[in-house]
Image: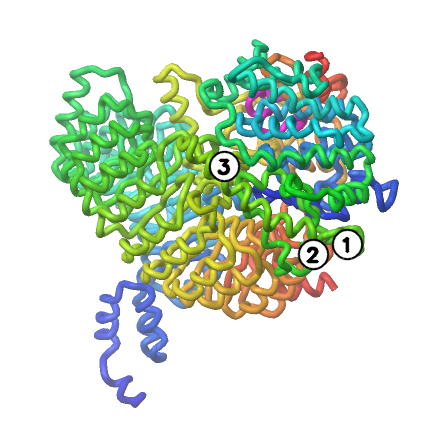
Amino acid sequence: MQKKMECSLPDEVLEHVFSFIRSDKDRNAASVVCKSWYEIERWCRRRLFIGNCYAVSPRMVIRRFPEVRSIELKGKPHFADYNWVPDGWGGYVLPWIVEMVGAYPWLEEIRLKRMVVTDECLELIAKSFKNFKVLVLFSCEGFSTDGLAAIAASCKNLRELDLQESDVDDLGGHWLSHFPETYTSLVSLNISCLGSDEVSLSALERLVGRCTNLRTLRLNRAVPLDKIAYILRRAPQLVDFGTGTYSADLQTDVFSSLAGAFYSCKELRSLSGFWDVVPAYLPAIYPVCSRLTSLNLSYAAIQSPDLIKLLRHCPSLQRLLVLDYIEDSGLEALSSSCMDLQELRVFPSDPFGVERNVSLTEQGLVSVCLACPKLQSVLYFCRQMSNAALVTIAQNRPNLTRFRLCIMEPRTADYLTLEPLDVGFGAIVEHCKDLRRLSLSGLLTDRVFEYIGRYAKKLEMLSVAFAGESDLGLHYVLSGCESLRKLEVRDSPFGDKALLANSAKLETMRSLWMSSCSVSFGTCKLLGQKMPRLNVEVIDESGPPDSRPDICPVDKLYIYRSVAGPRFDMPPFVWTMDEDYALRDS
Amino acid sequence: MSVIEFDGHNITVSVKDVEAILGLKNESVDIHEVVSKENVKELDANYNLNSFVNHVQINRFRTFSPANLKAVIGLLLLVPSLTLRRIRSYLEKFWVLMSPPLLGVEEEVQSNVSSPSVDCGLGLKERNYLGLSDCSSVDSSGVSSLPDNNKNNLNLKATELRLGLPGSQSPARETELCLLNSGKLDEKPLFPLLPSKDGICPSSQKNVVAGNKRGFSDTMDGFSEVKGYAYAEKSWMFHDAGSDSESPQTVGHGKYPGNSGANVILSARSPGAQASVKKDEPANVLQKQPHATNGINLKQTDISNNKSSAPAAKAQVVGWPPVRSFRTKTLATSSKNNDEVDGKPGPAALFVKVSMDGAPYLRKVDLTTYSTYRELSSALEKMFSCFTLGQCGSHGAAGKEILSQSKLKDLLHGSEYVLTYKDKDGDWMLVGDVPWEMFVETCKRLKIMKSSDAIGLAPRATEKSKVIN
């Protein structure tokens, strides 16, 4: 049998066949069929995704996959997005870049998420990879526009530069002028995160003018409204456009030129930006609205009446990001005009306010869920929710795959019955069989976790805050959710028993984050000793955890599986619970 | 183990630590030791209200709601070394941070204060302290008619504290308040979401009753003695949250958003402290009674005021709701611009200049990008590292640890430098004397000053209360 397999197909043919397998999962499956498949697969793997930069070392990756062209790496835990991970935690990309410079001279793509990227890294990338094409820095930090200038100056074949939501030290707009005048390959440029008041407009205009393949352009608020028309006219082929500042005194000539420029962009499918929007200028985009599939207004403070007018022009919309100024009335309008909607995100305009400032309730979400049959993904911030609403949503939208609900006040009960929201979220996991991501909020007991463990078999990521009553809750999840890869918990009374009882489960997951829970330091140590493939990191900015008794709960706990062993770049407030630690301790 | 845990609605205090604060176990225990359990290193050697409140605020509370505020008051009252005057001057600071619903809660407190039992053993001064809620009662009744504060004898305080309340007649405070709240306060109903009448109220009083004896066991007795309906929401709950987290008592913990207000749960986490804890009765009460009563009240509130059915006791929690910091920053800037368009003042990026004695350069920091003193400290530490590091080394605690908030504080307080700020009145104050939110509102400049030059800079609270008086 084995003999037959070996002889069945020449390596070249297999390699060709493998090249059609795009999904990492299938690639991984193929590589464990037999030794020869493993060998062939590893030599022809061009794209790598590493969900945790500490799960494996760069050298191990390079040893196994010598011919990589594209790498995607993720760094900090997801909760870092909300500033819940202390500054300096880690997630440095430099060691990776340094290793890859030697091993992958033909590397073309680097996509990073939540990593610390320094200007040194960017300069290294710029000068080392001869055919570098794609740099995506999503929620990254640590670099400045000087580093970007190096990329601009050296990467002749750069197609994509995306700085989405990165924290860039913006030293001024001059870096754009480092793109050589001969450079024309840009397809996608996203600089919307840059905070500078200035951007080199002439450099930007020239760049846009000469890069005829530009499809995506997202500007920052330094680009004034009266320049938008000019830029759009130079790039009528744009598919995805993010405006700069969208405010000016209302002047008919500015307006008509803007409207004309939008009208000439026949390919536009996606709009974003609208910083500091003046609603009177919104009708300028009406001519393109009918084609729009994606609209990101989540940084635009547009009140409900203006939004309603706008949405009536957008029948093809599939994705809408919006502030809660949309209110129930706007969502009602959305549900009647945008039947193709697949993704809805409603962000709070005043997240830290005490009083509700808008009339947005569960009703808005319910009406969208009832009317939009394709809705799959929901992120919704609101101040009140009921079990009845959640049950309605679940029964009518069983196709939901991502459901993130944030009721802003922690532990808010069903406002109608004053019951916990267990039943509502239970209905979501019961009916939405393909649910992959779920964020819980509101008043929740262990019951909801029982439902989740029982029904959410495809759930991959679960976020929990201020929920549950005991270890039992966590136990239900860890023992029940077969597909769970990431679990993040804060301020919930989960502790030792559940973790110890499910320690093997942790090795099947990418990571577990627990902050302000009830996990004792002793359990952390125990897990670290008994589970050598887990990196158990205790994070406590107030001092070494071993200065307290073992039964004391740890401040923050981050557990992830790793074949690389403990990391070496821990800041002083992170302690790894490995055997060495145990030895030191005893 | 934490001294105080605040989970959004309840405050959990380990009995051991409270005993330590009270000095029950050992007269010599001072807050220095207690705090070090929290691993906040070397707070001021002399425990004072500043460090306590900052400690509490920085580490656990950060913002103030009736729940945590009352618990803090209660705790402070239990600390023998604190004069009520100092506590009160602090509360004035909190006051302006509180929103009308909170005041409403306080008003309820007040109306219940007049029960005779409160008098027992309380000195006039302490009554006066309680009177800080009187002002809200003045204001609340002022909505419809004249103030009626005859039922209590705390008018003096009322006058003072009225300064901080919405709709008050004091011009100075009123403007300040309007600034703080973007001018919205006046338009709001004062008590849109009054919790149950019998609800939260008794909390601080009863505890003050016990607190006046300044003894922990007295407090306990107070609890077990009180019976009946009004006690349903007894806030100082004692339950054993010790080793067995599945014990039934914990079920009620934090289940009643908005109404659980001032539940302070003293959990006996440390073995040996449990003997004095009477856990059963209060825990049961917490589970059963409040549910019914509050439920009705909440509903009524909702019906009568469906625009604002948010829970009364809005308790903000650090880092909640989960909004990306990038988004928060952007929103802060854009709302500024929008409000400018509308001609209204609003939150904005708050750049303040930072200088350091002896440093050749100035820096600017945007206070809105930080949410705690800790974050600010570490940012400043980075900016002025070449200067502070030397100090750090000389302080002996340098080495591998990064400069934490406490350490900077330590560094700045204990050594040659202190971090000071100029408030909106132009006075230079020591950083860390008021809650972070208030600091952000008032800070106009920052200076890392030679401590020899900073002598005489009073902590804000005392200074200001002098002015007011």
Say whether marks 1 and 3 touch (CB < 8 Å).
no
Quick check: A178 left or right of A470?
left
Residue B274: assigned label: 1
Residue receiving disc 3: B311
* Mark with earlier residue (1, 3): 1
The quarter of the rendered structure image containing the C terminus of chain B is top right
Q: Are marks 2 and 1 in contact (CB under 8 Å)?
A: yes
Whether residue A448 sits left or right of residue A149 in the image: it is: right
- Give the residues in magenta: B432-446
Residue underneath mark 2: B242
Pointer 2 chain = B
Q: Which mark is residue A228?
A: none
Residue at the extreme top? B171
Picture residue at 22% right of the left edge, 52% below the top: A374
Q: Is residue B197 visible?
A: yes
In the displayed structure, A454 sits above or below B181; it is: below
Q: Nearer the viewer, mark 3 or mark 2?
A: 3
Q: Chain of mark 1?
A: B
Badge 1 element:
helix
Work out whether mark 2 precedes mark 1 in sequence or the reverse, and give the earlier one: 2
Alpha-carbon span between mark 3 and mark 2 = 30 Å
Q: In the image, is B283 to the left or to the right of A68?
A: right
Instruction: Check residue A482 for magenta coloring.
Output: no
